[in-house]
Amino acid sequence: MRLAPRSIAVLSATALAFSAAAFAASTSTAQEAELQTGGLAPGGYLVLDLGADGGSKSEFVYYGPDDTAPTKAESLSSASDCVLAEAGPDIVSLSPTPSNKSVGLRDQGLGVKSRGPGENCAQIQGGEVLAISLGTDTVVDGKTIGAADLVVEVTGECTFYAQWRSDSALLGDAVLLDPNEADLSDCGPNSGANDNYRITLTAPSGATGLALSAGTDTSVRLMGGAETTEPSSIGPSTTGSVFELVESDGVLDCPDEPNGEESFYTENLGRANEVTVTRLDKGELQDNGSYLCELVDFSLDFDGTTVEFGKDLTTQPNAEFTITATYTDANVVYDGPTREIDYNYDGDYETMVWCNGSATAPALPGDQVPPAPPVGPVDGWCVVSEAASISGSGDSTNQVTSDLVFYGKGDPRMR
C-alpha cells in the first residue's frame, strides 16, 4: 500500500529538467566558456535491505545513479538484546532520542530500544525519535537527499511524524502522517503486510537526514522490505526503503540571509580561473507583503572553460542568480563577439542576447525564453557583461583572460 501525504509533492525517479547554454567571449571559438544549467545531478540511491525481495540480507547499500547492483554496503546486525551493530563503510548514521537509548533492530525493522527483548525493543514510541542521516563515506560525501520512498510499520493509533534535517538543524515543520485516515491501514497489531505502508516524501533543499517519531499510542518501525511485495517508486527495483541522493555543494540563501546561510559560492581553480554564483531574489512574495525565502540546493563545477550549475527550484521557482566566470586560455585568435545558447543539448544553437536593465539590476528581455512548448515554469539566461584582455607575462606568449557575467531567472527547461 502507498501513502503520499497531502502536504508533500511526490518526486519522480530523477526529477531533473536540463537545458544547456554555450557562450563564447570576445575571442574566437578557440576560447569558449560554456554554461550548463538545469536540475541537480543524480547522486545515486541508498537502500535499507532487511530481507527485501525475499532475500536474507541485513544492510544499507549504495547504488550509483546508473548502477543495477550495489557498489558499497554497510552491514547491520543485532544480538538477543536487539541493540543495533553496524560494520563496514559509514554510509548511513542512525541515532536515537532520548540519547541514553540505543537503536534497535528486530524482525526486519529498525526502531529505538526502550525495553526488550520483545517486539517493542525495536519500535519508535511516544517521546522517541529515530534519526537517519548520511554518513561520512566518499559515496555520500557532498550529497543531499532529494526524496525518500520508505516502508514503515505502524500500529496502534496509527499516526506518526516525519521531520527533515540538515545536519542537526530542522528543516520546516514535521509532517503528520495518518495511514488509517487514508483507509490504508488495519493498524496491527503485528499483521504483516497489512500494517506496512510505503510513504513517498520529497526533501527540501539541503536535507541530509530524516527523523521519524510516533504519535499518541502509536508504535512505528522503519522496515527493510521483508513484509511487503510493493517495489519502490524511485531508484532500484526493490521492496526495501529507498533514499534518493543528489549532488550538492550546499545551499544558497537570499541576499539578506534570513536562514543564516551564504547567498553566494565560489569555485576557484587558481591560475585566474574561478566561477561565482550569487542569488539575487528575496524569495516568494506572500499575501501579507512579506517574502518567504527557502534555501536553494545547488551544485557548481568549473574546469576552466565549462561551468555546470545545477539547482533545485522546487520551493523557489522564481529564484534569480548571476554567474561570474573568469578563465584564461592561450593561443587565441580574435574573432569578434559570439554568444549562443543550446536549450536541448542537440547542437542547435540560438543567438544569445544582452540583458535589459542595468549591470546591478539585470532583467530578462521578453523574447529570452526557451523554444516552445516549454515544460513547467520557464525563464532564461542573458548576458550582463563580458570582457577579455591579454594577460601574459610580458613575453611573446599569447594569453587572454576573459570575464563573463550571466543572469538567469527560474529554471530553463528542455522541450
Image (spheres, helix red, strand yellow):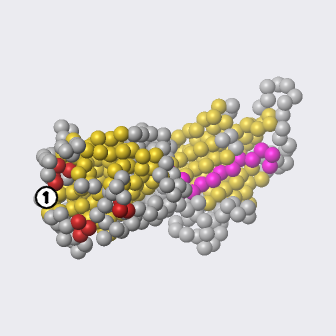
- Give the residue displayed 60% in from the left and 73% down from the top: 373
Name the quarter where the N terminus is drawn.
Answer: bottom left
Residue sitting at x 52%, y 66%: 377
Q: In the figure, 38 relative to 135: above or below?
A: below
Q: Position of residue 277 (x, y in %)?
A: 56, 45
Nearer to us in this view, 334 or 185: 185
Residue range highlighted in magenta: 29-44
Residue 354 is drawn in which quadrant?
bottom right
Residue placed most toward the observer, 22 or 132: 132
Please name whichever residue, 320 or 204, is drawn nearer the observer in this view of the structure. Answer: 204
Residue pushed farthest top?
394
42 left or right of 384? left
**What residue is pinned by disc 1?**
216
Dot 1 lies on which element? loop
Where is the C terminus found, in terms of image quarters?
bottom right
| Image coordinates for residue 321, horizontal then vertical, percent | 55, 50
